[in-house]
Amino acid sequence: MSSNKSKLSTRETSMRPFVYSRPSISSISIRVLILLSIQVVMLAVTKSFDSLYVVLTAVLGSLCAASLNYLIYKEPPYHAITIVIQGMIIGLLLPANYPIVVVFMLTFGCIFTARSIIFHGVNSWINVSAVAVLIAWFVGKIYFPQFLITSDLLTVRNPSVYLIQNGVFPVYNFDRAFISFMNTRVFSLFHVTVPEGFISLLWDNQSVIPAFRFNILTLISSIIIFADKSFSELIPTLFLIVYALLVRLFAPLINGGAFNQGDIILAILSSGTLFCAFFMLQWFGTNPVTLPGKIIYGILSGVVYFAVTGCGTSPIGMVYTVVIMNVFNLIIRAIEERKNTMIFENVAATHPPVVSEVK
């Protein structure tokens, strides 16, 4: 008996009772940081140095906040990664001409206050980056761009074409060549033509706010993020579908135009719609956990975004939407918790625990 016991005590065993249904927060954070860094690199490639300085300053502010947070609470290293991501998002959502001193103070102050004083952790019920950008909007509204589309222009069919033809959005040479080829070889078979400029809107629309620019990179990033279930694709998908339908059906009608004539392309490819939908709308701890909750959250976010932004070119509408939906998420999560409690109480009442008497 003693020999068997000694063999069992010296034998190495490995118990692995858990299986991850999705990647951990640390692995998701690293992936998101890499994807956002590609957009920062594109600022350097396109020689957008003013925007690059703003983003790097915001990252520096977040690093200082992360360092001070570590000295106080000795949090795990991956917490610092999420803090840096928050700083990078803040920088990408600020215009290129925003004063970098204010960027540093704003980023450091908001992140440190939220992470070290109020919430003390990764998860919080509100998106700190969105709050910081809103504060930046109220402090320096003059630095943000104006709406590019007026109520009169909304009544025109395809206002995006009007803006492109008037030089508001750039048209690159490769755009002209590609659209010309498609119109000649493909679209001519259906007796339709596509105007130049839509490929340029996807590639780089030259917005002064970096997060609004590289829509094609944002789309590719979303595929990578959703491929391994890092985030749920249900919420942004419902958000985009609902918003696109509302824009198509009602945007011109509200301004005296025709029904079902809204410009979906302009709405989706401006205002940072794709960036915020994929990187901000379901930040850690700010979205529901149940399927019905996610469906309600996705649909409601599309309705709120349409009410706040209209049909595009808003400098701050998506950030407002994220903060508003954070508040609605509290209500949804409270309902989810209440429902789970009721289910548990019903199960406990109908299946009382069996207690066996020990003799």
Image (cartoon, helix red, strand yellow):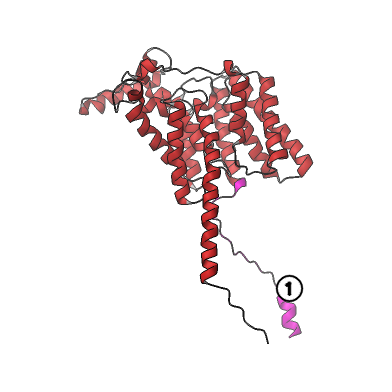
Position of residue 17 in the picture relative to residue 152 (left or right)? right
Position of residue 54 in the picture relative to residue 227 (left or right)? right
Q: In this orientation, which residue lies closer to the viewer: 281 or 34? A: 281
Residue 246 among those drawn in magenta? no
Tell me if residue 207 can be seen: yes
Q: Which image quadrant for residue 155?
A: top left
Residue 45 at x, y = what percent? Answer: 55, 23
Q: Point out the stretch of residues depicted in magenta.
A: 1-26
- Is 205 drawn above or below residue 277 in the view shown? above
| The C terminus - image quarter | bottom right
Q: Which image quadrant for residue 71?
A: top right
Q: Which image quadrant for residue 256?
A: top left
Residue sticking out furthest to the bottom: 359
- Given the image, on which type of amino acid does mark 1 rest? Thr
Residue 135 at x, y = what percent? Answer: 62, 26
- Is 232 drawn above or below residue 58 in the view shown? below
- Residue at mark 1: 10
Tell me if residue 230 can be seen: no
Q: In this orientation, which residue lies closer to the viewer: 65 or 248? A: 248
Q: Image point 60% across, 29% down: which residue?
A: 90
Residue 113 at x, y = what percent? Answer: 70, 35
Q: Secondary structure at mark 1?
A: helix
